[in-house]
Amino acid sequence: MADTEDTRAGPGHSETRRDFLYLATGAFGAAGSAVALWPLIHQMSPAADTLALATTEVDLSPIEQGQSITVVWRGKPVFIRRRTQEEIDEAQAVALDDLPDPQTDAQRTKKPEWLIVVGVCTHLGCIPKGQATGDRKGDYGGWFCPCHGSHYDTSGRIRKGPAPENLPVPTYEFLSDDLVRIG
Ligand code: FES
């Protein structure tokens, strides 16, 4: 499979295209065309009551090791992955010198088992693949953004491709072992 592919248009790709357009709201800086995008963004913005949900509480108990879920927080997808020991070991073993946006795994997690990141590619705002079983997860086992070929590792850090930064870690807090509040 090619390293890049255009998933933003064409028959059978309407969902991805919609995701891309919708999530362009988070990519002003990277897109460099905020003025041109604004009317579209404004039209597609989430309802005010959605934006007002400053926090989202998530029950983690159904998530098994190796599984990921996507929740919506402030109109954005948030990826929650319950990492396997192998994924944790991989994330912790990386030398900072190998990272375009150097951050240790410990700086990005409160509990090694749980990785929580905003699921919006830091290049131009696509939603990376890697959440669903069978998704391509990229060369580093985390997520792969097919729009222009960005590869993220098991800590959500950019490792290869045009994305300039790691997937952002939102503010969150564990309310108990099985309950997390995002925001
Ligand atoms: S939006 Fe370009 S690589 Fe993800």
Image (cartoon, grey):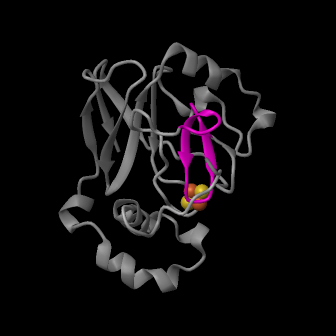
Give me the residue at 55% from left, 51% from top. 145
Q: Position of residue 8 (x, y in %)?
A: 46, 66
Give me the residue at 44% from left, 44% from top. 170
Tell me the quadrant of ligand 1.
bottom right
Going by the picture, which residue comes out furthest to the right?
Answer: 97
Tell me if residue 86 comes above or below residue 44 in the rendering: above
Give me the residue at 46% from left, 39% from top. 135
Q: Position of residue 96 (x, y in %)?
A: 76, 33
Q: Is residue 3 magenta?
A: no
Give me the residue at 31% from left, 57% from top. 75
Tell me if residue 82 comes above or below residue 45 in the rendering: above
The answer to which quarter of the image holds residue 144 is top right
The answer to which quarter of the image holds residue 49 is bottom left
Going by the picture, which residue comes out furthest to the top?
Answer: 85
Q: Is residue 122 visible?
A: no
> In the image shown, does 177 or 14 lie closer to the viewer?
14
Tell me the quarter of the image containing the C terminus.
Answer: top left
Apparent side of residue 75 relative to residue 162 in the rendered image (left or right): left
Q: Position of residue 14 (x, y in %)?
A: 35, 65
* Chain part drawn in magenta: 137-154
Q: Is residue 139 magenta?
A: yes
Q: Is residue 85 visible?
A: yes
